[in-house]
Image (tube, grey):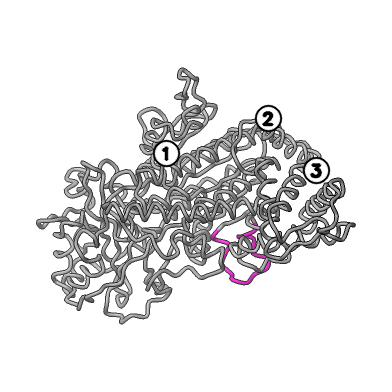
């Protein structure tokens, strides 16, 4: 590595006029080479010793700002290194030093194989060195296997199979026995599971990690008791949801025994946490570990430079793809301007690199259980759609990340089982506003007889990566006009969107309103919503029946009769009635729950947010994620049975942890029975 950086420094000295390694009248080649070698050595030594200290001193700097400072700090170290060279003739202009240091770090990163999947011997030797270093620093690891759970956010079961069929995910194909050579023995089994009505990361991951997602009716909802809007990707809301789940189950979570949580909304009870939203509740807390993973990763300048360069390339890729979509006048399409290219680059580059590096570190440390979330596909699919060239590249990179983790497992101090799963899928379709020219909030106001603004405010996307960016920048997660405590006139309804699921609440009524009360106040509202072609069905409380599903043409079916007469729920497939009945039992369910229309012929829904790939309600691929598990583990469910709900997935993962010898989640931590 030292020889490579020395050669790089010599080449740059010959190219850049403001960078010299010896005085102009000195023509000694030997002296030039010696100066370059000493300069490269001093730069490498300063990078190894001083850089981690600089990172620790910058703990109060937002993570993304630190990424931008990488180049300038590297340049400063190079200037110091040149001053230390005995010849005294080496010098570089500050702007040139930045370029030289960046190139040298990039070359070091490329030749070192930092966070890139490579099959060559050099990369394998690097893994051996990392593993050996860990083994010398730590006591021998246990012989019992550890488990790594990798969540591919938003990747549905059928999409995964399609990606395997197209050759986009060769690692997954090999695990399933469908590799390029064919005839391979599968090492993993693929199981589809069914989400709850709220098919989104907040509900699914809370249930998977903490065993309960009770009273999480959507991605965002209004709680009348607290007069507050809850949003799953707001740090304060995530912390409160996690607290409620722990109180309900009486257990810290899936990762409470020697676990690590990386890049998640919730901790799962892990002692080791990084990039976890539920602990990012204070803006200026030095003890806050939610961004610790960024600084652990950026403490290596080679990693920092590589990720920064990849970040810039991804921004350019998104701008090019969105421009091509506009030129082709592709439909459906949503706005992808503003800060979105940077949000996408964060999700597909920064978050991926940092999380994968953290997981590798956990494996080399021999931790018992690790759960990590990669949000790259979900973020891109929201804006580019669930299918097509834009997301194909993302799926390829996710597969490479899995291959890298698989390689790291070969050198870990204990054996590891790699489980891959998703929290939901994504359903395609244009937005409700694009189809009908008005949003759900406008339709509700019209049904209430309230004035509809000529230019209604758009509902911003609630994708998880956007909240992760804001947490990294220490910005509060408040979206659009959404208020933490709504200050609008109490008589007006609050309309919130969660993908293709809408929620309507009347804040001046302290209890959940009944159909009869809503009809008395706004006689046309329920009829207007139920008969709109973009609405699939409504759920409301009834004084007579307890709960009813409303549909077009006057359909009104009590919940207890849905099994015999599903009515408007029939097109949503098996399990829809159970999902609706469960949500009806939640204390925080909105006065009116609105699910968009669904076309089973093409799998399309209509998002109430600005998304052309959406999830959050019933309809299509969004409710059918996957669980990819080693065949060495017991089957998730018996033949002929379905894996239904995030809480059921939690029980399966707990069982797998108990199947291994060694520290396990306590038996007494089984979730309590869900309240009726």
Question: Residue at 69% across / 61% down in the picture?
Answer: 96
Q: Alpha-carbon distance for marks 1 and 3?
A: 38 Å
Considering the numbered disc 1 on the image, is that residue within a helix, a strand or a loop?
strand
- The reply, left or right, for residue 374 in relation to residue 367 is left
Above or below, 72 against 657 in this view is below
Considering the numbered disc 2 on the image, is that residue within a helix, a strand or a loop?
helix
As rendered, which of 625 and 547 lies closer to the eye?
625
Q: Which sits earlier in the primary sequence, circle 1 or circle 3? A: 3
Q: Nearer the viewer, mark 2 or mark 3?
A: 2
Quarter of the view holding residue 70: bottom right
Q: Which residue has dot 1 on it?
A: 626
Task: Count residues near mark 2 (Cα–Cα under 10 Å), then give few for <14, some for 14-19, many for 20+.
Answer: few
- The reply, left or right, for residue 346 in relation to residue 510 is right
Task: Count residues near mark 3 (Cα–Cα under 10 Å), then give few for <14, some for 14-19, many for 20+.
Answer: few
Q: Single out the residue that lies furthest toward the right.
A: 86
Magenta span of residues: 277-292
Q: Alpha-carbon distance for marks 2 and 3?
A: 24 Å
Numbered tag placed on residue 137 in the rendering:
3
Residue 180 image point, x, y percent: 46, 23
Residue 3 image point, x, y percent: 78, 42
Q: Main secondary structure of the magenta part?
A: loop
Residue 344 belongs to magenta span: no
Q: Which residue has dot 2 on it?
A: 121
């Amino acid at each position: 590595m030292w020889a490579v950086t020395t050669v790089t420094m010599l080449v740059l000295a010959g190219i850049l006029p403001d960078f010299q390694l010896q005085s102009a009248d000195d023509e000694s080649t030997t002296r030039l080479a010696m100066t370059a070698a000493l300069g490269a050595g001093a730069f490498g030594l300063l990078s190894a010793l001083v850089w981690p200290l600089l990172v620790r001193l910058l703990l109060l700097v937002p993570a993304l700002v630190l990424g931008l400072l990488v180049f300038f700090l590297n340049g400063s170290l190079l200037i110091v290194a040149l001053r230390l060279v005995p010849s005294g003739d080496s010098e570089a202009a500050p702007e040139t030093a930045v370029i030289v240091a960046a190139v040298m770090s990039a070359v070091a990163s490329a030749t070192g194989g930092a966070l890139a999947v490579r099959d060559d011997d050099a990369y394998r030797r690097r893994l051996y060195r990392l593993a050996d270093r860990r083994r010398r620093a730590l006591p021998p690891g246990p012989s019992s296997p550890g488990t790594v759970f990798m969540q591919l956010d938003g990747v549905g079961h059928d999409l995964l199979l399609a990606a395997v069929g197209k050759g986009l995910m060769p690692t997954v194909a090999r695990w399933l026995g469908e590799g390029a050579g064919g005839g391979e023995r599968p090492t993993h089994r693929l199981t589809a599971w069914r989400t709850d009505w709220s098919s989104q990361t907040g509900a699914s991951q809370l249930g998977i990690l903490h065993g309960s997602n009770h009273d999480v009716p959507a991605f965002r909802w209004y709680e009348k008791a607290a007069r507050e809007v809850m949003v799953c990707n707001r740090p304060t809301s995530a912390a409160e949801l996690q607290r409620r789940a722990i109180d309900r189950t009486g257990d810290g979570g899936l990762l409470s025994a020697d676990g690590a949580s990386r890049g998640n909304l919730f901790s799962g009870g892990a002692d080791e946490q990084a990039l976890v939203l539920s602990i990012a509740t204070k803006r200026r807390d030095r003890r806050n570990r939610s961004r610790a993973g960024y600084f652990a990763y950026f403490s290596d300048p080679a990693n920092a430079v590589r990720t920064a360069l990849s970040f810039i390339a991804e921004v350019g890729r998104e701008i090019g793809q969105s421009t091509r979509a506009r030129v082709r006048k592709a439909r459906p399409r949503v706005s992808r301007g503003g800060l979105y290219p940077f949000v996408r680059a964060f999700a597909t580059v920064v978050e991926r690199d940092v999380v994968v590096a953290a997981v590798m570190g956990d494996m080399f440390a021999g931790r018992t259980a690790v759960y990590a979330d990669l949000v790259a596909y979900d973020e891109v699919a929201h804006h580019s759609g669930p299918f097509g060239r834009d997301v194909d590249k993302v799926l390829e990179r996710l597969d490479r990340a899995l291959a890298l983790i698989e390689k790291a497992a070969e050198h870990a101090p204990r054996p590891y089982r790699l489980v891959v799963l998703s929290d939901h899928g994504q359903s395609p379709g244009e937005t409700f506003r694009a189809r009908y020219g008005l949003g759900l909030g406008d339709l509700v106001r019209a049904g209430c007889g309230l004035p509809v603004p000529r230019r209604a405010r758009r509902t911003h996307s609630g994708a998880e990566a956007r909240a992760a960016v804001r947490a990294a920048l220490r910005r509060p997660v408040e979206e659009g006009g959404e208020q933490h405590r709504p200050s609008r006139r109490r008589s007006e309804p609050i309309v919130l969107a969660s993908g293709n699921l809408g929620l309507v609440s009347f804040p001046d009524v302290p209890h959940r309103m009944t159909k009869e009360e809503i009809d008395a106040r706004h006689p046309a509202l329920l009829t207007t919503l139920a008969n709109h072609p973009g609405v699939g069905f409504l759920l409301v409380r009834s004084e007579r029946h307890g709960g009813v599903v409303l549909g077009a043409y006057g359909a009104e079916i009590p919940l207890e009769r849905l099994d015999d007469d599903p009515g408007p729920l029939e097109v949503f497939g098996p399990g829809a009635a159970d999902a609706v009945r469960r949500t009806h039992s939640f204390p925080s369910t909105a006065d009116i729950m609105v699910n968009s229309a669904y076309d089973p012929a093409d799998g399309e829904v209509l998002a109430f947010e600005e998304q052309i790939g959406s999830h959050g309600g019933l309809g299509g691929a969004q409710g059918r994620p996957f669980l990819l598990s080693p065949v060495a583990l017991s089957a998730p469910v018996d033949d002929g049975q379905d894996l239904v709900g995030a809480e059921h997935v939690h029980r399966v993962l707990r069982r797998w942890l108990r199947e291994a010898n060694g520290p396990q989640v306590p038996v007494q931590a089984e979730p309590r029975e869900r309240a009726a």
